Image (cartoon, rainbow, N blue to C red):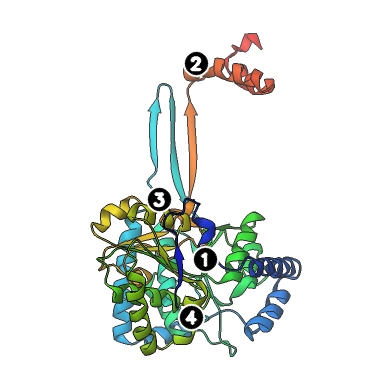
Amino acid sequence: MLRRLDLRGDPRDPGPLLPRADEALAAEVRQRVAEILAAVREEGDAAVRRLSAEIDGYGGPFEVTEEEVDAAEAGLDPDVRAALERAADQVRWFHERVAPQGWAERRGGAEMGTRYQPLARVGCHVPGGLAPLVSTAIMTIVPARVAGVEEVVVITPPAADGTVSPEILAATRVAGGADRILRLGGAQAVAALAFGTDAIPRCDKIVGPGGAFVTEAKQQVAAAAAAGIDLPAGVTEVAILADDTADPLHVACDLIAQAEHDPQATALLITPDATLPERVEAALADELAATRHRERIATALEGLGAAVLTDDLAHAVRVADAFAAEHLEVQTRDAQAVADRVRAAGAIFVGAHTPVSLGDYAAGPNHTLPTAGAARFTGGLTTGDFLKPISWVRYDPDELAAMAPVTDALGALEDLPAHSRAVRARLEAPGER
């Protein structure tokens, strides 16, 4: 089921050798998304309704009423509510601690610092396609509320009859509440939040995971400076860095758990143990036979699944860094020491008792994480994504005079004399002007 990729003794950069989504398909998505964004920008609500009817089968009123949310919350199973509350509490605890802190200091005659301003309005995408991701409501709304965002708008795709998962609606309340919930998904939803329409408010930032179209739409609106985004959080991926101490059943279960999300999911086993892939394959066969979404999972594992053989653990870490997985599990001896050597991963799950599925729901860190190798240069969603750093500075006259030779020299070097003049004018006595 997992293709074999033997990199033992191979000095090449492993990155291009590892499985990734089809670039030809990505090009098609880029073109279609560009067309959708252009339509929404030009036609507003009319385009949103038309595209939603074509894509999701629903083009009716988008606003979810408070009465609908009330009913969803009232009908929530008590055990499910308890689980949501426990998850929200854990996620809130983590995001309170990861929030950036402002500072101010004096240096000579200058005082400067940074303050963090909450964003005014953010849009949170909560997927509802193959599965209603109630956990994403928690993962996006909780840090927004911790940051102090003034207005939270949730978008989530409806069924063809316009209904939205009641569990998602209830989860928005448990997470701290949304000011507006729109039964709307896909690239047209991202476009509406980025450009604004008569019925849909323009958001400062759009966050949350999604499929290929949502992810591409987020990147295109960010490139157009129409809205900020958190990160490219597309189709899920997992890499498991394991040695001979790893339990093949645990490895198999974790590969299957992420493949369950999407038939285009990527699932890698990276190991220096030549016997582990076969043992994992046997466990995969048993687990797959017993799981509900076996067809979807098998498609993912056969399409973008691989067992990668490495020379040793150090080589395995280099391969993991080259892949830069959204989720990286480390199941080895002294797993923490191995995890500490990893440079590129959206989130690292350390040790045999820390499966990715725990992180999907309630471990604490956010499950909105970079995919497609973006973990080389960015991390997962945090409270800081909802806060805008604003630097400030204040100089007194003596300190300005002390810095004037610097602006003189650099202004002359760059042939920008007015820069130097703006400083010198402040140092002239009134009679010298």
User: Disc 3 versus disc 4: distance between alpha carbons?
Assistant: 45 Å
Circles 1 and 2 in contact, beta carbons < 8 Å: no
Q: Which mark is residue 34?
A: none
Disc nearest the viewer among 4 and 2: 2
The residue indicated by pointer 4 is 66
* Marks 1 and 2, the one that precedes in the sequence: 1
Disc nearest the viewer among 3 and 2: 3
* Marks 3 and 4, the one that precedes in the sequence: 4
The residue indicated by pointer 3 is 343
Is disc 2 placed on a helix, strand or loop? helix
Q: Is residue 317 above or below residue 71?
A: above
Disc nearest the viewer among 4 and 1: 1
- Residue 333 rendering spot, x and y as whole percentages: 24, 59
Residue 171 in view (yes/no): yes
Q: Label 4 amino acid?
A: Glu
Q: Is residue 431 left or right of residue 98?
A: right
Residue toward you, 353 or 277: 277
The residue indicated by pointer 2 is 402
User: Disc 1 versus disc 2: distance between alpha carbons?
Assistant: 57 Å
Count residues near mark 3 (Cα–Cα under 10 Å), then give few for <14, some for 14-19, many for 20+.
some
Task: Name the residue located 47 percent from the left edge and 16 percent from the top edge.
Answer: 398
Count residues near mark 4 (Cα–Cα under 10 Å), then give few for <14, some for 14-19, many for 20+.
few
Residue 75 in view (yes/no): no
